[in-house]
Image (tube, grey):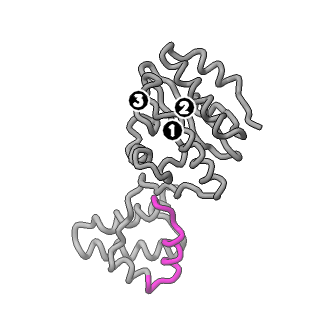
Amino acid sequence: MGKKDKAVDGYIEKSADFARPILLHIRELVHKACPDVEEKMKWSFPHFDYKNEMMCSMASFKQHCAFGFWKASLMKDTVLTENAKSESAMGHMGRITSLKDLPPDKKIIGYIKEAMELTDGGIKLPPKVKSDKQELVVPDYFLQALGKNKKAKATFEGYGYSHKKEYLEWITEAKTESTRNKRLETALEWMAESKSRHWKYK
């Protein structure tokens, strides 16, 4: 059976006057469509879990409410998938300021059942691609030099992003070819001894 959370009751009670009927209606539809749903407060707003997985969530703000699905990007409705891409209003149904802004009950129930099917089918969201670090460009001459020194190559390949970047920047920022070659030779020597670029200062 489904499980309600008193913290969600408190959240709804503290919401603005316009928001309470919206939140109550969404909550009622979720429980109606998914009798096994479990309510939980996460990130300070109500979530609805199904089979220990996040299914959907709702939230109220000063002037609007939001309602969204955890796997909206995998659902069939183009409005949901497009909103999932833009994430313009946190939810996937735009800014909800009154019950009139919600789709018909039948449609919302259909969304909830589709979200349940995704969970039942074991379908997961694709992993997010980390974009906080730029891809390192390793020059051909550097790769060729590493190819001739197995120990240095093993060390470089075992390095994390920052250690690789330190060596690459030091070598590629050399102003002359002779300086670059000297730095490359030194780098290979150090890496063969499993030393980082700034090992002297550690």
Q: Are marks 2 and 1 in contact (CB under 8 Å)?
A: yes
Q: With 184 as the anchor, is 4 left or right in this view?
A: right
Q: Residues within 10 Å of mark 3 (few under 14, many from 20)?
A: some
Q: Give the SS element for disc 2.
A: strand
- Say which label, 2 or 3, has the lower sequence index: 2
Kindly report the distance in space between the C-alpha atoms of the residues bearing marks 2 and 3. Answer: 12 Å
Q: Residue at x 56, y 35 (%)?
A: 57
Per the rendered image, the range of residues in magenta is 147-162
* Residue at the limit of the structure toward the right, as seen here: 1
Q: With 3 as the anchor, is 167 left or right in this view?
A: left
In percent of width and height, residue 88 lies at 38, 37
Q: Residue at x 60, y 58 (%)?
A: 123
Q: Give the SS element for disc 1.
A: strand
The reply to whether the magenta stretch includes residue 157 is: yes
Label 3, on which residue? 95
**Res 25 quadrant in image:** top right
Q: Specify the label residue 68 is tagged with.
A: 1
* Residue at the limit of the structure toward the bottom, as seen here: 148
In percent of width and height, residue 150 lies at 51, 83
What amino acid is labelled 1 in the image?
Gly
- Say which label, 1 or 3, has the lower sequence index: 1
What amino acid is labelled 2 in the image?
Met
Q: Residues within 10 Å of mark 1 (few under 14, many from 20)?
A: many
